Image: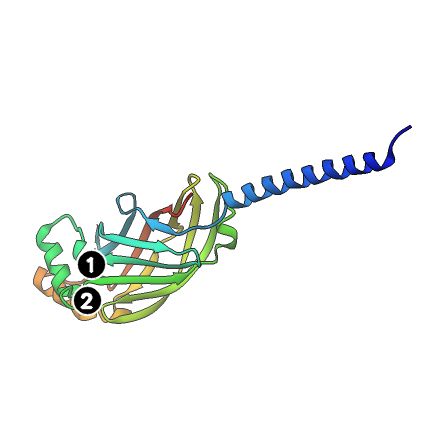
């Protein structure tokens, strides 16, 4: 004769075991996508802009001096060392440092924003998503609001890549850089330097605080 009490107890034990196992799997799955701080990998990141002089000559420049982070809260900050500007011509580097950016007084440009991590943190390796990143750029003692179209890609379990999907147009007048552009134009003997520049970037972050 079947002992119904023992059957019920055995069934409860099996169900408890299954629930514990499922809970463990769920915890492991969620922990895989728990968001930690990101640190910018400077050597793999780039930020560049293009200038046009005399209405015809296009030149590309970049800043190798980049640092930054994205905190687990979603707050982020990218710092650009303006003294690191690389134009390909040393004397032009010096002129832009001194006459345009005035690095003795304003050595850095800083972009700060808040990123909604609810979807980004769920990206699996190889997946991407596009969004508009809104934030503030502090440059030359002025603050301007920017909306940047970006793509975020999870390239590995701990590495994320953020890149512009199209260039951001920065106006010199918005950051009181017009006088600096005039000074550059005069010292180089140019007829014209376009006061707006398109800026693009690719930023590589590595997730920290991994157990």
- Give the answer, above or below, for where 163 lies relative to 155: below
Secondary structure under the numbered disc 2 in the rendered image: loop
Secondary structure under the numbered disc 1 in the rendered image: helix
Q: Are marks 2 and 1 in contact (CB under 8 Å)?
A: yes
Q: Where is residue 84 in the image (x, y as percent from the top left)?
A: 18, 54
Q: Position of residue 130 (x, y in %)?
A: 47, 51
Which quadrant: the C terminus?
top left
Name the residue located 46 percent from the left edge and 50 percent from the top edge: 35
**Mark 1 sits on what residue?**
82
**In this rendering, would 2 be left or right of 182?**
right
- Give the answer, above or below, for where 173 lies relative to 122: below
**In this rendering, would 102 be left or right of 136?**
left
**Mark 2 sits on what residue?**
106
Q: Where is residue 41 in the image (x, y as percent from the top left)?
A: 30, 46
Name the residue located 29 percent from the left edge and 43 percent from the top edge: 44
77, 6: nearer the viewer: 6
Name the residue located 41 percent from the left edge and 53 percent from the top edge: 150
């Amino acid at each position: 004769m079947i002992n119904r009490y023992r059957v019920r107890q055995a069934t409860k034990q099996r169900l408890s075991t299954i629930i514990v196992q499922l809970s463990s799997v769920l915890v492991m799955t969620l922990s895989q996508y728990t968001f930690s701080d990101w640190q910018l990998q400077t050597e793999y990141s780039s930020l560049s802009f293009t200038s046009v002089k005399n209405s015809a000559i296009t030149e590309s420049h970049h800043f190798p001096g980049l640092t930054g982070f994205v905190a687990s809260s979603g707050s982020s900050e990218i710092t650009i060392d303006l003294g690191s500007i690389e134009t390909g011509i040393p004397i032009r580097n010096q002129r832009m440092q001194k006459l345009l950016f005035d690095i003795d007084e304003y050595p850095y440009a800083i972009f700060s924003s808040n990123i909604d991590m609810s979807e980004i943190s769920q990206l699996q390796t190889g997946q991407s998503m596009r969004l508009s990143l809104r934030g503030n750029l502090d440059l030359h003692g002025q603050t301007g609001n920017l909306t940047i179209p970006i793509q975020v890609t999870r390239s590995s379990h701990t590495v994320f890549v953020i890149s512009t999907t199209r260039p951001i147009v920065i106006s010199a007048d918005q950051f009181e850089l017009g006088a600096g552009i005039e000074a550059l134009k005069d010292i180089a003997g140019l007829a014209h330097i376009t006061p707006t520049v398109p800026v693009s970037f690719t930023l590589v972050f590595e997730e920290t605080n991994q157990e």
